[in-house]
Image (cartoon, rainbow, N blue to C red):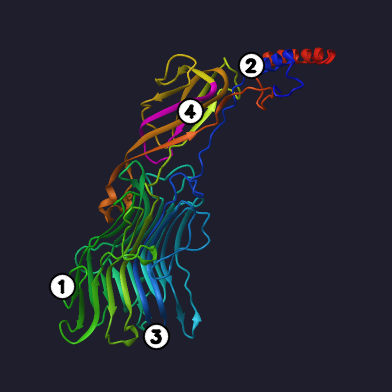
C-alpha cells in the first residue's frame, strides 16, 4: 500500500495500516506429529536395510530311483528374510525361492517346511510336485506359527519323525524391531530318511523306509545323539558407532548322516556340535563380517573312525581302503555368495554388506554299485546368510509425540506443550533423556515459565533461543509411555518460534540372541548387548504473524479486540478521505 501514489499522501490511512500490523498478534497452532513409516521408501527411519538366511538339513541334486526322478530336493528347511522397503523375490544358490515373488507389501518373513522339490515325477511321467508341509508367517499381518507332527511320509521321497516347524515375523512401522527377531524360521527333526529303494512294503510307514539312500537319525545306536535342528533369523545388534547393524544367522545341529543304510556300502558321517553361519554389517569401515564355525566331523565305515579336516576331501571305498570308490566326502568352508554381487569377497570394505554360504558336509556319489545314484551330490547342512545396511548403519528412532494445551494462543498468553516418548522395543529403555531446542525467527520471542519432572531451561524473558533438558527420566518398560510438560509465554512481535525435540535412551541387556528354545544351537544364544537409539522430531512451528489477513486458526481475545479496533479506525479514515479532495 505504501508504494501506491494515490495513497502515499494519506497520513491517516498510513497510520491506520501501521496500527493494524501492530494490532494483529497471533501464535500459530501446534499439531500432533506422527513419525514417518519405517517400511516404505528412502524416507524410512534407519535407511534401507535387507537380509536373509536359509538353512536346510539336506539338499540333494540329480538323484533318480526306479520310482522317482529328482532334479533337486531340500529337506528340513528353515528360512528368514527382512527388507525395510518391502520383500523382493530371493533365490538361493540352488535357484529355489527363499522369498517368493509378490510379497512387496510385507517387510519380514519366517518360513519352515519339511520338503521342497524342484522336479519330482512318478512313472508314467505324471506331474508330482509335492506341496511342502509348511509353516509361514509374514509381517505386518501374520501371527507366529508353531506346529508339530509325529510322523510324516511323502513316499517314496521323504520320511520324517518328530517334526516341528516354527515361523515368526515382526515389524514396526515407526521404528526398528529390537529385542526379538525380525524374522525367524525353525525346523526340528528327530529322523529324516530320503529315497526309498526297497520293494518291501511290510514295514509300516510310521517306522520309516526299509532301505533309505540317505538317513539322518538321532536314535542311531552309539553315543547320545542330537536331533536335527535348523534355525534361521534376522536381528539387529549394537554397531560400532551410535547406529545399529543387521545380523543374518543360520545354525544347524545335525544328527548322524548314514548313506546306503542296511547295505554293504553303508557309511556314516558324525557331526559333533552345531554349525553356525553369520553375516553381519553395521555400515562402518571393517564393520561387515561373515563368520562360519564348522563342527568336528568324523567318517565311520566298517567300525573305523576317520576324523575329517575342513576343506580337505577324502574318498570312501568298498571295502575300506581298497576296491571301488563309493563317494567323495568333504567338510565345507566359508564361501562367497555370487548372487550378492560382491565378487569373490564375503564383505564390502565399507561395512555395508556381508554375504556367504557354507555346507557342513558335501558328499559326491561316484562309482557306486547302483548307477542310478552316480554323480548325485548331497549337501548336509546347507546354509546361506546375507545382510545389507546403509552407510553409517541403521538409525533406530524412539517415537516422540507433542501435543498443545490449546490450538491457538496470542502474544502474552501462556501455552503448555506435552512431549511424550514411547518405548517400542521388547526390552527396557533406560537413561531416558529429552532435549527440546527452541529457536525464533524475525521478532518472535518467548519466556520459559514452567518445566515438569525436574527439567531445566533458560531464565529471563524475550528470549531468542534456549534449550530445555530432562537429563534423566529413568527407565521405560516395553510399550510404556513417559510424558513431560513445558509451559512458555509467547512474546515479541511478528516472527516464528521453532521447536525441535530429541529423545535418547539405552536398551541395556537386551536379549538379541537366540531364544531359549534354540539355546543349544549357538554360543550366541545367551549373548546380550547394550544398544541405544535416538530420534529427532521437527514439529509445526509457533508463529507470530504481522499483516491484515486473519489466519484460519483465529485470534485470541486480546488480538481480536486490538484487530477490531484497528479496522474501525481504518474505516473511519477511509470515510474522511473520500469526503476530501486529494492534496
Q: Is residue 311 above or below residue 135?
A: below
Residue 306 shows which numbered tag? Answer: 1
The residue at the point 40 percent across, 75 percent down is 72
Q: Is residue 333 left or right of residue 548?
A: left
- Secondary structure at badge 2 equals helix
Residue 520 lies left or right of residue 433; in this view the side is: left
Dot 3 or dot 1, earlier in sequence: 3
* Residue 393: % across, % down: 37, 47
Magenta highlight: main SS: strand
SS type, badge 3: loop
Range covered by the magenta-colored residues: 420-443
Which is closer to the viewer, label 4 or label 2?
A: 2
Residue at the (41%, 20%) spot, across then down: 457
N-terminal label among 3 and 2: 2
The reply to whether the magenta stretch includes residue 423 is yes
In percent of width and height, residue 182 lies at: 41, 50
**Distance in Å between CA atoms under marks 3 and 1:** 33 Å
Q: Which residue is mark 2?
A: 22
Q: Is residue 145 visible?
A: no
Q: Which is more N-terminal, label 4 or label 1?
A: 1
Q: Is residue 110 visible?
A: yes
As measured in the structure, the alpha-carbon distance from the residue carrying label 3 to the one carrying label 2 is 97 Å
Disc 3 target residue: 66
Taking the spot 48% from the left edge, 77% from the top edge, the residue there is 128
Q: Residue at x 34, y 72 (%)?
A: 193
Distance of label 2 from label 1 (alpha carbons): 95 Å
Disc on res. 419: 4
Amino acid at each position: 500500500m505504501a508504494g501506491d501514489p494515490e495513497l502515499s499522501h494519506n497520513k491517516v490511512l498510513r497510520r491506520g495500516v501501521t496500527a493494524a500490523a501492530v494490532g494483529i498478534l497471533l501464535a500459530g497452532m501446534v499439531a500432533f506429529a506422527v513419525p514417518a513409516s519405517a517400511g516404505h521408501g528412502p524416507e524410512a527411519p534407519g535407511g534401507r536395510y535387507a537380509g536373509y538366511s536359509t538353512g536346510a538339513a539336506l539338499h540333494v541334486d540329480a538323484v533318480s530311483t526306479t520310482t522317482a526322478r529328482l532334479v533337486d530336493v531340500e529337506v528340513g528347511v528353515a528360512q528368514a528374510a527382512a527388507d525395510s522397503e518391502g520383500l523382493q523375490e530371493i533365490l538361493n544358490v540352488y535357484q529355489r525361492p527363499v522369498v517368493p515373488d509378490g510379497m512387496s507389501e510385507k517387510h519380514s518373513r519366517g518360513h519352515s517346511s519339511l520338503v521342497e522339490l524342484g522336479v519330482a515325477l512318478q512313472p508314467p511321467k505324471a506331474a508330482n510336485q509335492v506341496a511342502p508341509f509348511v509353516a509361514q508367517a509374514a509381517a505386518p499381518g501374520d501371527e507366529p506359527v508353531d506346529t508339530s507332527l509325529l510322523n510324516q511320509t511323502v513316499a517314496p521321497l521323504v520320511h520324517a519323525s518328530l517334526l516341528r516347524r516354527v515361523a515368526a515375523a515382526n515389524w514396526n512401522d515407526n521404528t526398528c524391531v529390537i529385542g526379538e527377531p525380525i524374522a525367524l524360521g525353525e525346523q526340528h527333526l528327530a529322523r529324516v530318511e530320503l529315497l526309498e529303494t526297497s520293494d518291501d512294503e511290510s514295514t509300516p510307514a510310521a517306522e520309516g523306509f526299509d532301505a533309505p539312500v540317505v538317513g539322518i537319525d538321532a536314535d542311531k545306536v552309539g553315543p547320545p545323539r542330537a536331533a536335527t535342528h535348523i534355525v534361521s533369523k534376522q536381528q539387529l545388534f549394537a554397531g560400532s558407532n551410535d547406529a545399529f547393524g543387521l545380523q543374518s544367522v543360520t545354525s544347524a545341529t545335525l544328527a548322524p548322516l548314514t548313506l546306503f543304510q542296511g547295505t554293504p556300502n553303508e557309511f556314516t558321517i558324525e557331526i559333533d556340535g552345531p554349525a553356525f553361519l553369520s553375516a553381519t554389517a553395521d555400515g562402518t569401515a571393517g564393520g561387515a563380517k561373515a563368520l562360519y564355525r564348522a563342527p568336528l566331523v568324523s567318517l565311520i565305515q566298517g567300525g573305523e573312525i576317520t576324523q575329517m579336516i575342513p576343506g580337505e576331501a577324502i574318498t570312501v571305498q568298498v571295502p575300506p581302503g581298497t576296491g571301488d570308490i563309493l563317494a567323495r566326502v568333504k567338510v565345507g568352508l566359508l564361501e562367497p555368495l555370487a548372487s550378492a554381487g560382491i565378487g569373490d569377497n564375503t564383505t564390502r570394505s565399507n561395512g555395508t554388506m556381508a554375504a556367504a554360504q557354507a555346507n557342513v558336509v558335501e558328499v559326491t556319489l561316484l562309482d557306486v554299485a547302483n548307477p542310478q545314484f552316480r554323480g548325485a551330490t548331497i549337501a548336509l547342512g546347507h546354509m546361506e546368510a546375507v545382510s545389507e545396511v546403509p552407510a553409517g548403519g541403521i538409525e533406530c528412532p524412539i517415537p516422540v509425540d507433542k501435543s498443545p494445551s490449546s490450538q491457538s494462543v496470542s502474544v502474552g498468553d501462556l501455552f503448555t506443550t506435552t512431549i511424550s516418548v514411547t518405548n517400542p522395543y521388547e526390552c527396557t529403555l533406560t537413561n531416558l533423556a529429552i532435549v527440546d531446542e527452541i529457536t525464533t525467527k524475525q521478532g518472535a520471542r518467548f519466556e520459559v515459565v514452567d518445566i515438569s519432572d525436574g527439567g531445566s531451561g533458560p531464565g529471563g524473558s524475550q528470549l531468542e533461543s534456549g534449550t530445555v533438558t530432562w537429563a534423566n527420566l529413568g527407565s521405560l518398560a516395553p510399550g510404556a509411555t513417559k510424558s513431560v510438560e513445558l509451559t512458555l509465554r509467547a512474546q515479541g512481535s511478528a516472527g516464528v518460534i521453532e521447536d525441535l525435540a530429541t529423545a535418547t535412551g539405552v536398551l541395556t541387556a537386551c536379549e538379541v540372541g537366540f531364544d531359549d528354545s534354540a539355546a543349544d544351537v549357538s554360543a550366541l544364544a545367551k549373548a546380550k548387548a547394550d544398544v541405544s537409539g535416538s530420534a529427532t522430531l521437527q514439529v509445526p512451528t509457533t508463529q507470530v504473524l504481522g499483516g491484515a489477513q486473519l489466519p484460519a486458526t483465529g485470534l485470541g481475545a486480546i488480538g481480536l479486540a486490538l484487530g477490531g479496533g484497528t479496522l474501525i479506525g481504518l474505516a473511519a479514515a477511509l470515510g474522511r478521505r473520500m469526503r476530501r479532495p486529494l492534496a
